[in-house]
Amino acid sequence: MFENLARAALLGLAAATAVAAPAHAEIRALIVAVSHYTAPIPSLDGPPNDANALRSVLEAQGAKDIVAINDQAATRASIRAALEALGKRSKPGDWVIFYYAGHGAQAKSKDPNEADGMDEFMALSGFRVSRPDPNQFILDDDLRGWLVNFFPTTVNVLQIADACHSGTMNRAVGPSVFKRRTALDNPMAISLPPGPPDPAARAPSSEDPPNLVYVGAAQDDQFALEGPLPRGDSPSRGLLTYALEGALQERRPNGRLAADLDDDGRLSLAELASSLESRTRELSSTQQWSSAAVPARNERSVIFQPLKPPPADDRPVEVKAADDQAADLLAGKGPWASIPRGIPDLTWNAKEGWVTDSRGDRVAEQVTTDEQMTGVINKRKAVGQLAGSANERVLRVDVGPKPRGKLYRNGEGVDLAVTHKGQAAYLTAFNLAGDGTVQLLYPLDGDGNGQMAAGQTRVVMARTKAVKPFGVDNVVAIATPAEPRALRTALKRIDGRRDSLVAAGLVRDELDTARGEAAMGLGELYTGP
């Protein structure tokens, strides 16, 4: 993603114009996908797949005016011309979607107005690190200017950037299937030449354009990733675009979209943004989560309608044995398929007790029996079921004191706090340990009925020590309008048992019963020796 644009509201989700869309309003799009690059910039595998997926999504929404520019055809001049032409064709009330999948990058800036001393830019197919050609990159300011000058405020513009420029978060202990969408490992090593004269390259003012909406792939300190999704043998996809598809397809037991948090049958921009953050975080084991900020006046704007759900994937989780003991155990029956080679969903060393996922993270420790392995697999499924319904703009789970996604070593202090931004509600929280064990966290004896006022933060754990079993813990918090006695009774009944799928089902049923008045948040805790 491109940091300056995020702050300037082109690459931060700015308010879309509150224009009443006439009956003839259309969705128009420019899709730019760049996968082939010049060494030393690594080429990418996912952008063509992402571009095709987005085209299918837009066609399902009724879009007919879709322009695609790929690889060598994607230059500064061709993208500028295509955007200008789209602006001339657009009518009041239309939605224009500008989508880019490829490498994002930073370089040291000569502009004294750049607060961080860096230029953010899209690196196009012919970009060379040694001799940057102005026609093979697009600066954030240039892109902002085009979108401001080519589209009147009566036309809404949604920019989706499945790209990145920097990052530091990675707990991987082994090879990861993910590839970073950043062109430069050392952005301070190069500077960019001045671009060609362009009267539309900069916005006429520094004010946030009211009609430009943005969804970015990652936070400022993260890499945007691509990899085989949903399984190790699947085509490579950018996490953001794959998450967007899921947000338009995955449904709760009541038939509503899981991302339709208020259960009104409409997927608003605020709901979509919240869902994308949770989905990208779950897909990447917290190495990436999307960036978005929806202004209050535009929270209920709707662009996308639900898509037909994909066929159910009934294939068992693929597990590769890392030792003979695991191979013997995997030869028996269980919710897995034992594979001797290829990229598995999980790798298991039963003698040493560790389990890693395809991202390279150790998701569980001290797993030495087939029963424990079943718990790991079911926990993985349970978290996947819950991620799409998380509403972290209302209920946020914070694990500290370290930044999100960081590893806590044995004996290090851990805090857990839950903040509720909605109306007064009753908080219930439990943990899903790495082996799927359910651990009730709140309320416990002495905590009362768990009622929280709007905006209140409740400390669920304070300075608890990270101890065995190590791996990935997932904290589930749910705020309900009435005291959830039945939910709490059921959670107490399975407390200490490997019943993660049961716990996930209880939460999903509670969300359905509340019909949009309950909120659920997820938190992750990574521990290791």
Image (cartoon, grey):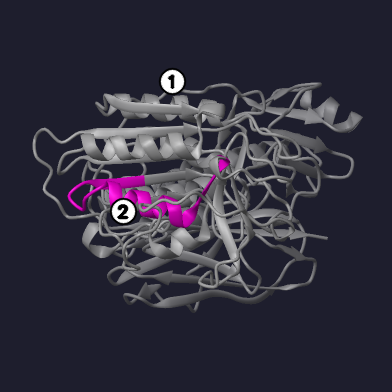
Task: Report how many numbered discs are placed on residues in the image.
Answer: 2
Query: Could you tell which of marks 1 and 2 lies nearer the N-terminus?
Result: 2
Give above or below for 387 relative to 358: below
The quadrant where residue 527 appears: bottom right
Left or right placement of residue 212 versus residue 367 in this view = left
Indicate whether 93 appears above or below 423: above
Q: Secondary structure at mark 1?
A: loop
Q: Are marks 1 and 2 in contact (CB under 8 Å)?
A: no
Residue hosting label 1: 311
Q: Nearer the viewer, residue 242 or 465?
A: 242
Q: Residue at x 33, y 25 (%)?
A: 308
**At x 77% / y 35%, what residue is drawn?**
347
Element marked by disc 2: helix
Residue lying furthest front in this view?
Answer: 197
Where's residue 356, x and y in %?
A: 75, 42
Q: Is residue 352 left or right of residue 163?
A: right
| Amino acid type at mark 2 | Val
What label does residue 168 carry, if any?
none
Task: Tell me where residue 161 appears, x and y as whole percent.
Answer: 47, 45
Q: Which residues are magenta?
A: 136-158
Q: Which residue is mark 2?
A: 148
Density class for disc 1 (Cα within 10 Å; few <14, some 14-19, many ≥20) is few
Q: Amino acid at mark 1?
A: Pro
